[in-house]
Structures are given as C-alpha cells and as structure tokens.
Image: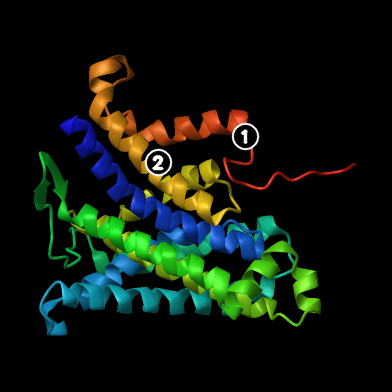
Amino acid sequence: MTTFLQAVAGGLGQGSVYALLALGFVIIYKSMRVVSFAQPAFMLAGALAVSFLAEPLLGIPSPWGFFLALVLGAIGVALLGLGIERTVIRPMVGKPVFVIAIITLGIDIVVRLVANIFIGLDVRPVGDPWGLSSITIGSVQVQERHIVMLVTTVLLVVVLFSFFKYSRLGLAMRAASFNQETALAQGISVGTVFATSWAMAGALAAVAGTFQATGAGIDQNLWIIALKALPAIILGGLDSLGGAVIGGFTVGLVESLVATYQGDFAPWLGQNFSVVSAYVVMLLVLLVRPYGLFGTKEVERV
C-alpha cells in the first residue's frame, strides 16, 4: 500500500504539470478553434525566465524569491503570448485553421531556438528551494515539490474557473467560444478574447515549465514534456476545461503507476513503457469516445 500511495503522490505531482499545459491548449482552442503548438516554447521560455529571476540578485530569501520569480516569469510569458497573438496570429484570423496551426508550429521553433541560446548545453537550475527533498506522511515519502505543484495547480484551477464563471471578461470568453458571430453581435470584442486566451495559455505554460524544471533543472529538451499534454486534452475533450484538468491528472497517475508496477506484472513490455502509456490510454479512449470523456460531440449534417 505504501508503494501504491507513493506512486499516486508522484503521479498527482506530475499530473499537475500536464493539467496546466492542457488548460492552455484548451483555452486557445475554445476561443479560436485552433490547436496552438506554441505551448512547448512558452513552457521553456517561462522556466528560463524564472531561472534568471530567481537568482540571488533578486535579493529575497527563498522560497519567496522563487515564487516572486514565478509570478514575474508567468507575467512575462503572458505578455509574450499577447504580443505574438497581436502581431502574428491576429492578421491570420479568417484564414484556414490548418494554416494558423502551422504558424503556431513556426512560433514554437523560433522561440525555442532563442531560448536555447540562453540555456546553452548545460543544465540550468531553476532556483527552486526544494530540489528532490521529501517529507514522510505516515509511512509514505512524498517529494516536497510535488506537494507544491499540486497545491498551486488546485489554486490556479479554482481561480481560473471562478474567472470564467463570475468575471465579465470570462463570461465574454465563454460566449465567444460558443458562437463568435453571435458574440460580436452582442458587442463582445472577440479580438480581446483571442488576446486574453493567448496570455492565459502563456502564463499557465510558464508555471508548468517551471514546476517541471524543479529538481532536475532546465535543458534544451524540457519542451518535450509539453507533448504529454496532448493525450491529456484528447482524454478530457479538446473543448473541456474540466476535462483538461482531469485528463492531465489521469496521464500523470497512469505514467506513475505503470512505471511502478509494469516491471512486476508485464516485464515483457520492456523498460520505459510508462513513457508511452499515456498514448496507449489515449488510443483506447478514442476508440470508445472519439471526442474525449468530456468533449462536445459534433454532429455534421450532409
């Protein structure tokens, strides 16, 4: 039981990163009906920004210095997303969705190339105060960073859902996600909705990238983790915010449990099968529910 609980704790911690990334994907998709492939670059840029801001020159003792750097890094990447949307994406509104998706792929490559110049060939510490330290709860050892990841993600999800439910701009974003033409007719600025969605996705990716870098640091391959968010959004449904959160945590739990028990129950699958386990689950879900567990089923009449 102790081993199982430790695997669950690790899975929830890692799942927090996937959930934040998945939320960014879904927010942009709901506003523009485009899958943004720039999220990996935002993730890398956010972690890199925090690694510079969290250095001792900040002058504030850890962990407050780290959290302040995290907030500033998230704001910085949000502004980056805002600028990219306004200068690159906005002029392409009305063009085929496929074209805009390819443009986001180009944005991802450009931003990552610039970030890699600052990262260099070595692993760069992100400045977190926890490292790989653990605490014991009962008989279960839990990494401190996983606790921080989980608590922060839950707080962000509560704030995010409250924003969409109670704020004027959040309600406007929900209206635009249902029907942009009707939203425009009601006086809603769809351009503001687009810009806000990119800023929010950038900030969430920055937080996710920073958490992923805690303990291990930043290298040029950090962005690959963002691809794990794709099974999460397929699992939960591409247009479901709640589904993104559940999908992210599910992917984290599946990976952790498979990594813990696969060697005992299915050694013939080879080593590191946990790396692809999320994609196997995604395929199984797609066979049963092509729109994900919580996605909206689209009916096309011909």
Q: Residue 172, can we see it?
A: yes
Q: Is 173 or 93 nearer to us in this picture?
A: 173
Residue under label 1, please give it: 289
Looking at the image, residue 153 lies above or below residue 245: below
Residue type, label 2: Val
* Quarter of the image where one finds residue 172: bottom right
* Quarter of the image where one finds residue 26: bottom right
Residue at image coords 23%, 53%: 146
Earlier in the chain: of badge 1 and badge 2, it is 2
Q: Name the mark on residue 258.
A: none
Helix or strand or loop: what does disc 2 sit on? Answer: helix
Residue 264 x %, y %: 23, 18
Residue under label 2, please give it: 251
Residue 243 x %, y %: 52, 49
Q: Name, please, the residue furthest toward the top.
A: 268
Residue 180 x %, y %: 74, 69
Q: Is residue 122 left or right of residue 173?
A: left
Q: Is 122 or 57 nearer to us in this picture?
A: 57
Q: Name, please, the residue furthest toward the right.
A: 302
Distance (Cα) linking label 1 and label 2:
17 Å
